[in-house]
Amino acid sequence: MTVTNVAPWMTTVGASTIDRKFVADIVLEDGRVINGASLYSGPPLPEKTYLPLIYGGNASASWGFGGIRAGSFSASTCIAGSLDENSVRGKIVVCDRGGNARVAKGDVVKKAGGAGVVVANVAPIGEGLVADSHLIPGLAITESAAHTLRQYINSNPNPRATMVFRGTQVGIKPAPVVASFSARGPSVESPYVLKPDIIAPGVNILAAWPDGVAPSEIASDTRRTQFNVASGTSMSCPHVSGVAALLKGAHPDWSPAMIRSAMMTTAYSQDSQGKPLLDEKSYNQSTIWDMGAGHVDPEKAVDPGLVYDLTADDYLNFLCASNFTRQEIRHIARRSISCSRKQSKPWDLNYPAIAVDFEASETMAANEIVVSRTVTYVGESAGSFSGTVNNPKGVTLTVNPMKLDFTAKGEKKSYSVGIKAEKLKVTPGNTVTEVGRIVWSDGRRQVVSPVVVMWKQGY
């Protein structure tokens, strides 16, 4: 539940990897090779020479006349001034993630006289790697690789290693996967609006870079470049912004909600090998809260067939249904709003995805929620769409009608979804989530809406 920017009128974008990596290895003296990632392009380490290896937490500096040593966290994460120069001089230093920027750790090691830096993932970062333009020979390794490396250091009286920088490799599999740093749902504000909406490329992305700014963004870095390789949802969001601009160019009459709908209902949830998208944190299968509706597919989004549109009044009705106060709604709408006494439910917002919840208990009977949706036809000629259902585990979905016929572009049709959930026992304070989907198809296009069903149990 780390996702932010979750308002239903925003398109919330998670990050995925691409099939390109910048590969670097740390080679231990015993012959083992630990894979990592790096953009370092400076002078390599001496060829066929193994350098002493030390963990930053074992090299804390002493301060002042009292001989007070740097804290273990400061030294293990290589915070400025935390490393003892006599301990790290001429060595490769292993620094844990956290406390300061990844590239800043290499700068700290360099100022202390170290020869190289290994930036090690820690929980909960997991197995995701981001390549950085280090000032000294340096690379990043995964959380599991970090355990292996620390075991080698702790079990060897004279641990030694070297680094090999292998440059760019393409055709990496599996790809895409959900980036380890990408924020996860559900939304704390409202689990009835699927967030993130979609994912897009956000790891090791070639991007324009401002003049006068070093690629590492460190003051001591005198390098300058017109382009850099960057990672973050700050990279995936521009991808989706670009797709949205292209869709608006192709369909000037589309609203922002229609554009988002086109991207969500045509998104894919399988990688280049046809397997379910994985989560880079653990390389287990990703969930609906990791990837939203899936990975954006621009070519399919330009011709979705059907879209789910929304107006400002729809959003205001959602706020009313979500029990926002009149003052809170006025602050958002910038005008006075009177909520109807007959309020709709928050899951009735005409969103491309459907999310509902049930209160789980020992005495829970089979409950049913009925949700309505309205689609707008955006095809150029008459069309007919048939619905198919993939039920979430423990749930029966009933769609009515199962066929939608359209005679002209812009025509709207509504359908209802009965969501009947079986009794389920849930541990107090927890939520169980199951996912299905509704697919409308005219034989050429598929319009996919995820259906998320949650069982909640309070304390």
Image (cartoon, rainbow, N blue to C red):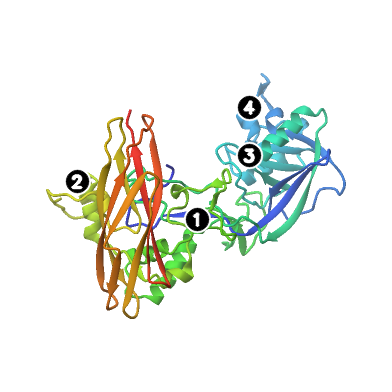
Residue sitting nearer the eye, 10 or 340: 340
Q: Which mark is in front, 3 or 1?
A: 3
- Residue drawn at 77 percent across, 28 percent down: 155
Position of the N terminus, as image quadrant, is top left
Q: Badges 4 and 2: C-beta atoms under 8 Å apart?
A: no
Earlier sequence position, callout 4 versus callout 3: 4
Earlier sequence position, callout 4 versus callout 2: 4
Q: What is the C-alpha distance between the residues marked 3 and 1? A: 24 Å
> Which disc is residue 143 wearing?
3
The percent position of residue 186, horizontal first and vertical second, equals 39, 45
- Mark 3, other Cα within 10 Å: few <14 / some 14–19 / many ≥20: many
Q: Which residue is mark 1?
A: 234
Residue 85 visible within the image = no
Q: What is the C-alpha distance between the residues marked 2 and 3? A: 47 Å
Q: Amino acid at mark 3?
A: Glu
Secondary element under disc 2, as helix, strand or loop, is: helix
> Which disc is residue 327 wearing?
2
Residue sitting nearer the eye, 21 or 97: 21
Please tell me whether residue 266 is drawn above or below residue 144 in the rendered image.
below
Q: Amino acid at mark 1?
A: Ser
- Residue drawn at 24 percent across, 50 percent down: 319
Please tell me whether residue 265 is drawn above or below residue 433 in the rendered image.
below
> Which disc is residue 72 wearing?
4
